[in-house]
Image (tube, rainbow, N blue to C red):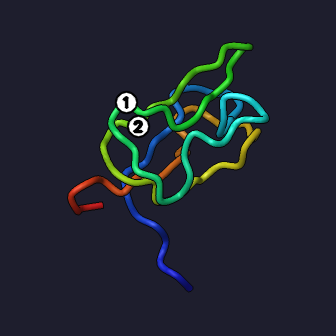
Amino acid sequence: PAPAPSGLEIRSPMVGTFYRASNPEAAPFVEVGDPVRKDSVVCIVEAMKVMNEIKSEVDGEIAAVLVQNGEAVEFDQPLFLVRPAGGAG
């Protein structure tokens, strides 16, 4: 089997519903292979009708999307793997 992607996890700061885009017609915020910067919005977690933008904590590249669009997520659940810029990860 292929090795599992490695990197730093972007985790959900709350329980809610995971959305890859700002609305159903919009393109996802990020795809695997996309570069991200610290504080780039990578997804939305909706909790109690509030759309919360989730941001990357590092500069790097999206290595994996770990959750499906519209999926319920738990507090601290990994959402993405980011390969940090400049090597290790």
Amino acid at pointer 1: Asp
Q: Position of residue 39 (x, y in %)?
A: 37, 30
Would you call the spot at circle 2 few (<14 residues within 10 Å), some (14-19), or many (20 or more)? many
Task: Say left or right for 44 vs 88.
Answer: right
Residue 56 marker: 2
| Of 82 and 27, the residue lying toward us | 27
Amino acid type shown at disc 2: Ser
**Numbered tag placed on residue 71 in the rendering:** none
Task: Determine the residue positioned at 21% across, 58% down.
Answer: 86
Above or below: residue 64 compared with residue 24: below
Residue 31 x, y percent position in the rendering: 56, 52
Residue at 37%, 58% (x, y): give it. Answer: 7
At a point 36% along the width and 57% down the height, the residue shown is: 83
Query: Is disc 1 placed on a helix, strand or loop?
Result: loop
Q: Which residue is mark 1?
A: 39
- Disc with the residue nearer the chain's start (2 vs 1): 1
Counting from the top left corner in percent of width and height, residue 74 is at: 63, 35
